[in-house]
Amino acid sequence: MSEQHSTNESPADDAPSHREVVIIGSGPAGLTAAIYTARADLAPLVIEGEPSSTSDQPGGQLMLTTEVENFPGFSEGIMGPQLMTEMRAQAARFGAEIVTAKVSRVELAERPFCIWIGDPEAAKPTHTADAVIVSTGARSVMLGLEAEQRLIGHGLSTCATCDGFFFRDQEIAVVGGGDSALEEAGFLTKFASKVTLIHRRDELRASKIMQQRAFDNSRIEFAWNSVVDDVLGETKVEGLSLRDTRTNETRILPVTGVFIAIGHRPNTDLFTGVLDMDEAGYLVTGADRSTTNVDGVFACGDVQDHTYRQAVTAAASGCMAAIDAERWLESRTD
Ligand code: NAP
């Protein structure tokens, strides 16, 4: 971690520090963009975020994952946080500067672009940039239980594709009633002996075809009108305390795993009204490109992808953003 730079110093009295490229966010997308832009001699600055809770920390969602077995290049798998440490060190090796801080404000109407860390009302930005790569990611919506912080990566997961494999022949649960929950439940039946879908109402939100597939799947059972009051287990998931919303009766569902699939939120508040977003708040990028509606601002990773949401696809789009930014900087005439 020797590459980590302190960010508490406030350059408010000084001129903003200028970079050709500033990357906001440090998951697989941002760090891959950093590796590529650093190797292109663009001396990128990565503003990696800072921890504000167990579920919100630099490095993105892989920091909440235990074993990652589907990232190519690691035949025996690698722990999520270790993978991020390696990516971070790789970016630093080529000269990327990484600061542990959160961006509080951006001004993207004119170039150079202005970026604030700390007081968003400060007269001067802390940084300016010719090009900005946005890789702020997305977060899974959680139930808000204390146990989620404790057990995520230890039987509690937000990604069936990533973690389903670990639940072979086990009884597990999925929470949610939308397309994501049903898709995850269906996928998980490849491994688990039984998947209980826990939904807070007696009617699913998911599309009819997904519903029919779930109803036809003999390994999926439904806990209707049920909410999770608690996830049981100190160091690994041992069961769920479910409450019937009609009778208020509680019961224990003995499961070794639980997947929370109640939606995702992209981290795009900073860019409201500035960068084009879809109705769910994801940044809109050009077809097969990382370009946004603002010339010189690029987006990659989960902040613009609600379809694949994989570390490897995020990393790939980080590479695209770096190449798009490099070419844009080269072709610029102003
Ligand atoms: P979603 O459609 O918003 O569904 C979220 C589900 O979680 C709802 O059933 C909701 O219950 C439940 N929920 C929300 N907050 C909850 C809480 N605090 N406690 C318990 N349950 C809670 O989200 P999504 O399923 O992630 O889908 C997002 C979008 O992606 C949708 O447009 C979906 O169609 C699309 N998508 C498509 C596919 C596909 O076509 N293959 C796959 C995945 C996602 P209520 O129903 O009671 O509100």
Image (cartoon, rainbow, N blue to C red):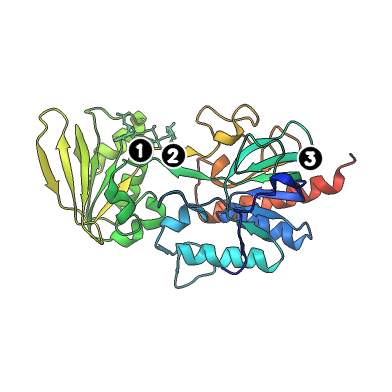
- Looking at the picture, tell me which residue is in the foreground, 26 or 197: 26
Q: Residue 264 has which mark? A: 2
Please give left or right for residue 183 compared with residue 85 in the image.
left
Q: Quadrant of the C terminus?
A: top right
* Of marks 2 and 3, the one in the foreground: 3
Within 10 Å of disc 3 (Cα), the crowding (few <14, some 14-19, many 20+) is some
Say whether mark 1 is within 8 Å of ligand 1.
yes
Q: Position of residue 265 (x, y in %)?
A: 46, 37
Amino acid type, mark 2: His
Q: Eyeballing the image, is 43 above or below 209?
A: below
* Location of residue 187 in the rendering, given as x and y in whole percent from the top left corner: 35, 49
Residue at the spot 73% in from the left edge and 60% down from the top edge: 38
Say the numbered circle drawn on residue 194: none
10 Å crowding of disc 2: few (<14), some (14-19), many (20+): some
Q: Can you tell me whether the CB of the residue at mark 2 lies under 8 Å from the nearest atom of ligand 1?
A: yes
The residue under label 3 is 112
Q: What secondary structure is marked by label 3?
A: loop
Give the side of residue 209 with respect to residue 299, left or right. left
What is the CA distance from the residue labelled 2 to the residue labelled 1?
7 Å
Residue type at numbered disc 1: Ile
Q: Residues within 10 Å of mark 1 (few under 14, many from 20)?
A: some
Residue assigned mark 1: 262
For label 3, being within 8 Å of ligand 1 is answered: no
State which quadrant residue 1 falls in.
bottom right
At mark 1, the secondary structure is loop
In percent of width and height, residue 205 lies at 33, 29
